[in-house]
Amino acid sequence: MKRMRCFRSAVAVIGGVLLVAAVPPAGANEIEELKAQIEALQERLAKIEAAQKEAEKTTVTAGETGGWKLPGSDTSISISGYVKGDFYVDNRPASGDTFNAPAIPLDDHKDATDDDGNVGMHARQTRLRFDTHTPTEMGALNTRIETDFYGSGNVLRLRQAYGALGPVLAGQAWSIIGDDHTYADTVDFDGPIGVIATTRTSQLRLTLPMGEGFTGQAAVEPAVKGNELPTFLGALRYSSGWGAVNLTGAVGRTDDGGQNVSAHALHAGANLNVTDATKVMATLNVARGGLNGRILGGGGGAVTVDGKLKAQESMGGFAGISHRWSDTVRSGAYFGWVENDTGDGVSAADVAGENKSLQSLHANVIWSPVAQANIGFEVMHGWREVYTAGPSEPNKGEATRVQLGVQYGF
């Protein structure tokens, strides 16, 4: 039996060897054919890759920061903005397309038509914005062009036009004297009196992160009235999960009639997230000598009396609270104030008609039925007091506005 098993094994091995030997090896022609096929496939793949590169030059693709990439480049572009219609009722004569507290009619007026109210509507806040983003070896290169229709006579107005490469921004943008962390969320375009005015100006700006939530900024902006020197600004900002604190300032000089006075503006703002849904905020602003206009409702800044240029000061600010009731409904209440000083050695009669003090109160509720829509209802009341040449002249006035704003974004 053992011999028989060995014989069978030997037969099997010999048979396998003979079978393998019966299969002819690949010939030289077959190898050449395989090489030709591989070369053909490689050539075809190269053509496909070249065709894809050509298509990319004319094909729109998704951008890195939203929007889309410009064909044949690394630049992402996006278009955004909104259409807004405002509808309002005043109990006094029209104060304009915004609630203009500095122009509230005075009491004891002589024009009987001042007793009439006013109904108005407009779409001037409608806004259009173009943004680009390009990665470079020096950091991101971002640009923005933004417009609205608040120019004179509904003319398209330039709001912002700037470019920023890394920490350096050049062009027209928000002045760093402002505070984007502490602002009033109002239906009215301007918001409460006493806030830093919506100042967008040409500038050269440097922004540097300083670690631990701190950011420092420095900027050069156009000169104050009549001066050949630019305005210099600085800002220190801190933000964290609990809120934010901002300290900003500007220095310059006002020239008039061959005389000059120093000018400065200081801003301090803070907000506190009381809860995930509730935030309180407050600002304090002081300005002098021509930079008073940086405060909404601020005075002229300088006046000439007896041939001498005198600096005037303004102080103002606002306090408010905002609350989010649900994912779609929020509301806010904001009180603002401004006090304008006559200036050293300047009497009330010298500045008769100028605003002495202003206050305004805004309360609103805003509904966002979808992410890109805001429908807001707001009630505003304002108080105005002016300097007069005598006690018999009217010096105070009040006004109320009710406004509905409907905003659709894109």
Image: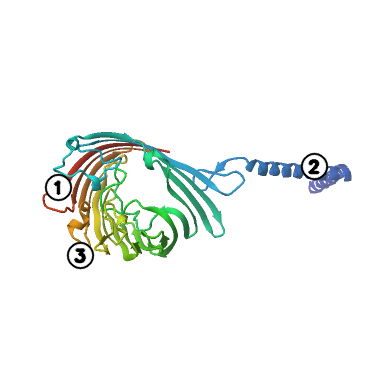
Q: Earlier in the sequence, mark 2 or mark 1?
A: 2
The answer, for residue 184, to whether it is visible in the render is: yes
Q: Is residue 189 left or right of residue 71?
A: left
* Vertical arrangement, residue 184 with respect to residue 218, above or below: above
Between residue 280 and residue 156, name the one nearer to us: 156
Q: Secondary structure at mark 2?
A: helix
Residue in the foreground of this view, choosing between 124 and 230: 230
- Whether residue 251 is visible here, answered yes or no, is no
CA gap, disc 3 to disc 1?
24 Å
**Residue at the (73%, 42%) spot, across then down:** 47
Q: Is residue 1 left or right of residue 332?
A: right
Quadrant of image for the C terminus: top left
Residue displayed at 47% across by 57% down: 169
Which residue sits furthest left? 392
Q: Position of residue 149 (x, y in %)?
A: 39, 40
Q: Between disc 3 and disc 1, whose residue precedes?
A: 3
Pointers 2 and 3 in contact (C-beta within 8 Å): no
Task: Find disc 3 in the rendering and name its residue.
Answer: 345
In this figure, which residue is indicated by the disc labeled 1?
394
Give the residue at mark 2: 37
Return the x and y of residue 363 as percentages of the image width and height: 23, 43
Which numbered disc, 2 or 3, marks the residue closer to the eye? 3
Circle nearer the N terminus (2, 3): 2
Distance of label 2 from label 1 (alpha carbons): 99 Å
Between residues 120 and 24, which one lies in front from this camera angle?
120
Are dots 2 and 1 in contact, CB under 8 Å?
no
Circle 1 residues within 10 Å: few <14, some 14–19, many ≥20 = some
Q: Is residue 236 above or below residue 126?
A: below
